[in-house]
Image: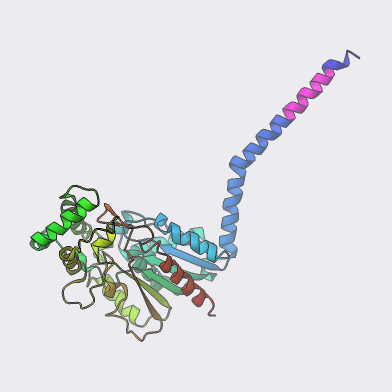
Amino acid sequence: MFKTIPMFKSILSISIIQRITHLFSLIFLLLFVLPDLSQAKQNENANHNNQLIVLFHGLCNNAASFKTIQKQLEEKFPSAFVIALNSVEGMQTLNLSIKEQAAACFEELKTKVADVANKSILLIGHSQGGNRAYAFLKEYEHLLKVKGLITLATPWEGAPGARVNEEMLTIHLTDDVLNDLHTLSVSLGYSADTLEKQLMFEVQRNQSMCMFPGAKDLIAGSDFLCATQKMLINEKVPILSIGGGQNNFRSLLPNKSNKHSFKALNNMYSLFTVGKDHPNKNHDMWIPLYSQHALNIVPQNNKKFERVFIKGVFHSTHVWSIIPVPQHQAILSHPRVLDTIVKFIKKVSSKK
């Protein structure tokens, strides 16, 4: 009897070793194999789902800017494959012309979505991404089945603010404007002259950016915009142009009890952003509404070009890089913007 004890211990040790081996195998599966299976499943969905929603980010931005919209679209359209393109992020939106950017996006899409030519495609572009999406549409419309295009704060008629230089800014920095700037700066927790210096820096930076092809294409009257506008007039693909408007710097204050009007600053900035000759002074702190809505290009009765104006919406998450926009008031996170996008997708998707 006692002679069997070592054998029993040996069997017990083997059993323990087998369990430990099984445990390590399970850990290996969780760490290495399952993520691959998950990615494979995602790719499989991209290959088999017929509806494809493609997102084009804006100038000097990246695919992550569409995080909120992408998540909502995936929830609202679970059978669709939603992809935010990242082949022309950051400086690539400056270094490449918009047509070159569109070509890079097409090459990226081909590598990430099998049988893309047979997909039912919806394009969504923010700011310069809207121009890029339309260039993409026109360049590859003979290869793809694009059912609709949604643009968010896209400068169809250019960005007039690009013409502002240091001399122009200096001329318009009156005592009243400086007082508004200093009041806003202190109200936001900065020293009195911080925003005055920041505004000058923004003007200098924008002038430098306009030397690059991607930004040069957005200057009013550029060859790219003129060619786009000629095609846009007779466009057959349904387009939803969502424009935002927020031209009051007071809306940036965290403490709304501050009753300062910022009238002088608002007037100067509207002059820079919109121009003095246009009667509609709405803008989103970067692009005038008339440009976002192509008001001087596409007739108001054109049923293929739908316009929606959403008041209280900023162009992006920050103004002048250092002033954060109140939560959910940037165009890529505003609830009404998201609802409008979903409704348009449902409408165009229901048409054969």
Q: What secondary structure predominates along the stretch shown in magenta?
A: helix
Residue located 29% across and 80% down the image: 297
Task: Compare residues 237 and 293 and report the one nearer the observer.
Answer: 293
Name the image quarter holding the C terminus: bottom right
> Which residue appears farthest toward the top when viewing the image?
2
Quarter of the rendering containing residue 312: bottom left
> Which residue appears farthest toward the right when viewing the image?
1
> Which residue appears farthest toward the bottom when viewing the image?
301
Task: Compare residues 95 and 330 and report the one nearer the observer.
Answer: 330
> Horizontal placement of 158 versus 179: left or right?
right
Instruction: Please tell me whether residue 164 belongs to the stretch shown in magenta.
Output: no
The colour scheme is rainbow
> Horizontal placement of 94 versus 24: left or right?
left
> Residue 9: percent from the left, percent from the top?
80, 19
- Looking at the rendering, the stretch of residues picked out in magenta corresponds to 7-18
Residue located 38% across and 55% down the image: 62
> Residue 298: percent from the left, percent from the top?
32, 81
> Residue 202: percent from the left, percent from the top?
20, 55
> Horizontal placement of 93 versus 87: left or right?
left
> Residue 42: percent from the left, percent from the top?
57, 56
Task: Compare residues 321 and 246 and report the one nearer the observer.
Answer: 246
Looking at the image, how many numbered discs can be counted on the residues? 0
Residue 324 seen from this side: yes
Residue 325 vertical placement versus 143 (above, below): above
Name the image quarter holding the N terminus: top right
